[in-house]
Image (cartoon, rainbow, N blue to C red):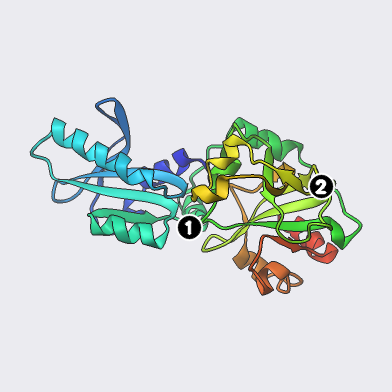
Amino acid sequence: MLEKDIENLIAQHPDIIFPNAGFRLVGQQIKLGKCFADIIFEDKHNRKIIVEVKRGILSRDASGQVMEYYGLLKTESPDSFVELVLCANIIPPERKKFLETIGIECKELGINYLNQLAEQVNYQFIKSRQTDQRQQTTTISVLPSADNIWIFQANPQRYDIMNALADDEIGDSIHWLVNQHKTEICKGHIGMIWLSGKEAGIYAITEILTDPQLMLEPDPERKYWTDATDKEGEKTRVKMKIIKSLLHSPLTKETIMKTDGLQGMRILRQPQGTNFRVTTEEWTIIKTLI
């Protein structure tokens, strides 16, 4: 799911996303000075509503961006009443509390919600060429041993995995911390990237390309850490190749918990940690769901 998909769904269906607000679309990618606002609506009171859309975690920078749009629009139309809205897949509670204190509305639009909305309104997602190629060329082999399959967990409060997986600069290669099972995870094993939190589930299948070793994280990946301390220094990691992206249609925790044979997965029973073993039986079932 691209950021443009989220923008399109909001612009085309404000009556669903903002019920009873009476929003009328002014336009998308509206030029304000040298900038472009994602969406501008008018409401039933003729107030202008600037909506800025962010995929993944709502960053600290987003508030400054939308406030700049406010200033630019007020410069062009001094008599206009202007409201600000920030939309993202995940909005940290402390960030939402602060933004709403200063008058910026926050709207969390989860991946599952957007997928359901897209199905409801028959919206066709835009797919990048790179993602299509990954999906078309993917074959997932049957693995003989439970020791060969692992979950690598991402905490959305610390790492913006949604945007990392969609980043063309990162491509199909990504590095991941190994904090548990350091002597068991090996080159050639299979990994599954799991997002924790409200949007929990499996977002990618990977092949592990290296044994765990001390390494620096490449610059294109480091920018997705939300805390500067997580970006620094050599840490035990593996390099992985993404062999199947599930970013457009993740295998959700909700689905997994309803599937016979998966309710006992370690990630569900003891979710604290980074690395979790997956049994061959669980992997066999998961492959039928992705």
Circle 1 SS class: helix
Disc 2 marks which residue?
A: 211
141 relative to 114 in the view: left or right: right
- Location of residue 275 by image quarter: bottom right
Residue, far top: 34
- Residue placed most toward the observer, 100 or 121: 100
x 62%, y 35%: residue: 170
Question: Mark 2: which amino acid?
Answer: Asp
The tag earlier along the polypeptide, 2 or 1, is 1
Image coords of residue 73 (percent x, y): 19, 35
Image coords of residue 140 (percent x, y): 81, 47
In the rendered structure, find residue 113 and report the number of the disc placed on it: 1
215 relative to 68 in the view: left or right: right
The Cα atoms of the two marked residues, 2 and 1, are separated by 37 Å
Circle 2 SS class: loop
Residue 93 position (above or below residue 246)? below
Q: Residues within 10 Å of mark 2 (few under 14, many from 20)?
A: some
279 relative to 63 in the view: left or right: right
x 79%, y 57%: residue: 182
Image coords of residue 256 (percent x, y): 67, 66
Residue, far front: 233
Image coords of residue 216 (percent x, y): 66, 41
x 66%, y 45%: residue: 234
Residue 132 position (above or below residue 142)? above
